[in-house]
Image: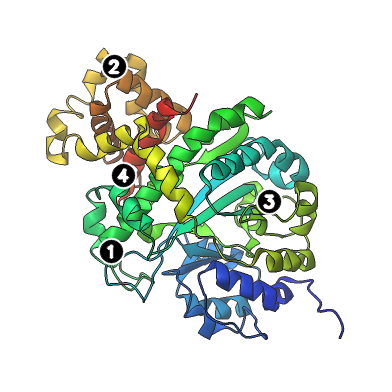
Amino acid sequence: MAERRVETPREYYSHPEVARSILRHLGNTEELPEVLSLLECEKEFHYIDSEYLAISNPEIKNQKDRSPARSVKPWEIPAYLRHNPVSEIFRSLWSRDSKVRVGHPGAQIIPWDVEYFNLPSPGYAFIDQREVFEKMEPAFQEMEATFGHYGIQHMTVMTGRGYHFLTQVPSVSPVMQDLIEIGNVIEEPVSSLQRQVPMFSKRDRPVPPNSQLAYKGANRLMQYVFGQTINNARAKSVLPIEISDRGEEGISFDETGYVRHLGTAVSGTLGSIYMKPLIKEAYYVPNTRLITRIARNVGGQEIDEVPALIQVRQNYKKSVDNLAQSGGFIPDGSAGVARLIKDYKRSELRQLHLALDNEPGDPPEKWRETYRKDDYAWIKDINTHLHEKVMNANPLLLQPDDLNYFINTIYDAWGAQLSSAGHIAALMRSIYEDNFGWGSRFSRHDSATAHATAWTAIILGQRFEKR
């Protein structure tokens, strides 16, 4: 029999191994037919565990004002791919499980995201791919060492500019209750928001409170792992390694999942074509092949090393072989995550998280007499430069460097006490909800609250990194 041709996006997504790996990655554990194409498998998409999917391509970008992706019902994916196979698939981090009781979370996927950034030349990651990934190797190895230390079974996916380290805690695992307890509380207005289904949403139901708490707990564990790993990686890296895109070029241990609540959180799918260079002009590099999301490591077994993987992800046929080796499934990391949780619960970072939960700062009705009093004039007593940043909050207090300076300076001025963390988050929220010309930036969902609380946790959390 002649070898199957795989030279175009349509032929790639039509290949049985690609369909099988993507469906497995999305949580379909049913027996799959031998003849399988992602363009023709509406039935199989009914059995995935992702609450919804999103699809991205240049056509959708041109149709939408803000987002280059569209949320869709899972079984709509084949029709979208038939229409335009030059597309990327994202899965919701909100999982469902028909076998568990109502209100109990489905599996919780935990996705650590490590990526290269270059602000003057965002597309550089696609100009010299081997150089970029070889510079990332110390960060990759240190992350793998941390997972090895805890015995966390995981899959490492090579993305466009870095890696996703993926594990999951199944709904039936005893560790799920630990994640829920770590999440602790759901802030307003997130809890109110999640009691309703947004208009025009592809989501059929409110987000169950325990699902949101498990997701919040997962984000807190991700922050802890990054804090335990980052300084070892820095000691071996030729590039700066930051918790966000600070500076001109470096590696980001990305904690911005904090900013999203579970109903809006998504992650790229293993096997999907990576579309960012065609979606965002700054990343576009002429004469560069489309690349695929492939696996580097599954369950502690490395599939290939960087030089070979760079070639694989630019070749549809080789990508098919890689996916076949990966199996697609995200491993159950419960046993290792349980060990991780024991260390996290003893950490100073845990105390910061509890302070943010238990002492949330002043409510909005008091802001006029507290944080916003006399146009934030009290901040001048701390630092006139700080007050200038507030008066120019848009754009300064959206930028990581300025946020770091602002939050750390306020924290130190208030005595560097954990009890002030909630007040800093509330202060930031009061600024984001003030009249600084934000436009629609903070008008959707719980944006201002999430942005303020997340960045307070991210920035103050760096004080508790392992030295």
- Viewer-nearest of discs 4 and 2: 2
Q: Is residue 322 above or below residue 36?
A: above
Q: Residue at x 57, y 83 (%)?
A: 41
Kind of residue indicated by mark 2 = Ala
In this figure, which residue is indicated by the disc labeled 1?
208
Kind of residue indicated by mark 4 = Ala
Neighbourhood count class around disc 1 (C-alpha, 10 Å): few under 14, some 14–19, many 20 upward: some
First of labels 4, 1 by sequence position: 1
Q: Position of residue 30 (x, y in %)?
A: 52, 80
Question: Alpha-carbon distance for marks 4 and 2?
Answer: 24 Å
Q: Is residue 28 visible?
A: yes
Q: Residue at x 35, y 34 (%)?
A: 346
In this figure, which residue is indicated by the disc labeled 4?
448
Q: Is residue 204 left or right of residue 395?
A: left
Q: Position of residue 186 (x, y in %)?
A: 25, 50
Q: For the residue labelled by badge 2, is the local secondary structure a helix, a strand or a loop?
A: helix
Q: Position of residue 160 (x, y in %)?
A: 65, 52
First of labels 2, 1 by sequence position: 1
**Residue 284, label in figure:** 3
Query: Residue 327's image quarter?
Result: bottom right
Question: Alpha-carbon distance for marks 2 and 3?
Answer: 44 Å
First of labels 4, 3 by sequence position: 3
Question: Alpha-carbon distance for marks 1 and 3?
Answer: 39 Å
Q: Quadrant of the N terminus?
A: bottom right
- Viewer-nearest of discs 4 and 3: 4
Neighbourhood count class around disc 3 (C-alpha, 10 Å): few under 14, some 14–19, many 20 upward: some
